[in-house]
Amino acid sequence: MLLQFQIAELASFLKYGITGLSAIAFILSYFLLYREGNRARPRAEYLSSIRMFMWLTLILGVVSAYVALKNPSLPTTPEPRQTTKKSVPGSLFAPKNKKIDLWTVEIFYDKKMRDKALEVQEVVELDETVEVKITLLDKQKRQELQVERNQIRHEATEKKMATGLKDDLKAVLNGNGIGLKLIRSSSPKYISVFLVN
């Protein structure tokens, strides 16, 4: 044969949709005709079947051209969606005039620290790039996580954000202090705050 295509090369045309399928059908019909034409005596029934296949291919090509001309702005692949918000002035986590993904700050508190937890929630919610969750910390969970004092738990890449949060919470905690604790986990853009009595 003059041209030889691997199946993987033909399959790569499918990324173009119906137009690619039409191109594959044209190539296959050419090779069928080429093989039958090289025989000493071409078979009439095969030639008529190949002609029907070629007509079907031609119709498919015309339809794909019509659709492409009618809707030229249709995207071939969807773009990934991102949840972003614009930074607010004085944001804890984002430089000014930059887009950033949402952060999650989860506040765990003892029963006696409920009021402080609500105050901390109000302070953190001032930053629109942060989603705040508040959760009661029971004794079993406290022992399991080995929480002995007020702390902010963060990953190594989140240290700058955790330090900014710590500075903002000093006034709310009235000198009760809050420490930073580096942890190894796989929860990006997530910081946990523990308020214990």
Image (spheres, helix red, strand yellow):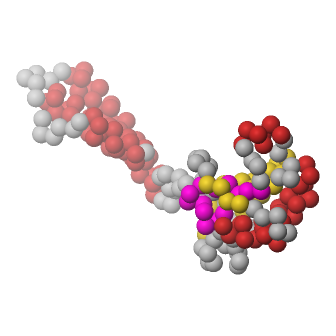
Q: Is residue 116 left or right of residue 191?
A: right
Location of residue 6 in the rendering, given as x and y in whole percent from the top left corner: 23, 36
- Residue at 73% from the left image edge and 56% from the top image edge: 151
Q: Is residue 121 left or right of residue 68?
A: right
Above/below status of 127 relative to 106: below
* Span colored in magenta: 150-162
Total of numbered circles in the picture? 0
Q: Quadrant of residue 94?
A: bottom right
Location of residue 66 in the rendering, given as x and y in whole percent from the top left corner: 45, 52
Above/below status of 144 relative to 19: above
Q: Is residue 177 left or right of residue 54?
A: right
Would residue 156 be counted in the magenta stretch? yes
- Residue at 10% from the left image edge and 24% from the top image edge: 39
Q: Quadrant of residue 27?
A: top left
- Residue at 40% from the left image edge and 48% from the top image edge: 16
Location of residue 123 in the rendering, given as x and y in whole percent from the top left corner: 81, 68
- Residue at 27% from the left image edge and 29% from the top image edge: 50
Seen from the viewer's position, the closer of residues 110 and 63 is 110
Location of residue 3 in the rendering, given as x and y in whole percent from the top left corner: 16, 40
Q: Would you say residue 133 is visible in this rendering?
A: no
Would residue 169 be counted in the magenta stretch? no
Q: Would you say residue 40 is visible in this rendering?
A: yes
Quadrant that contains the N terminus: top left
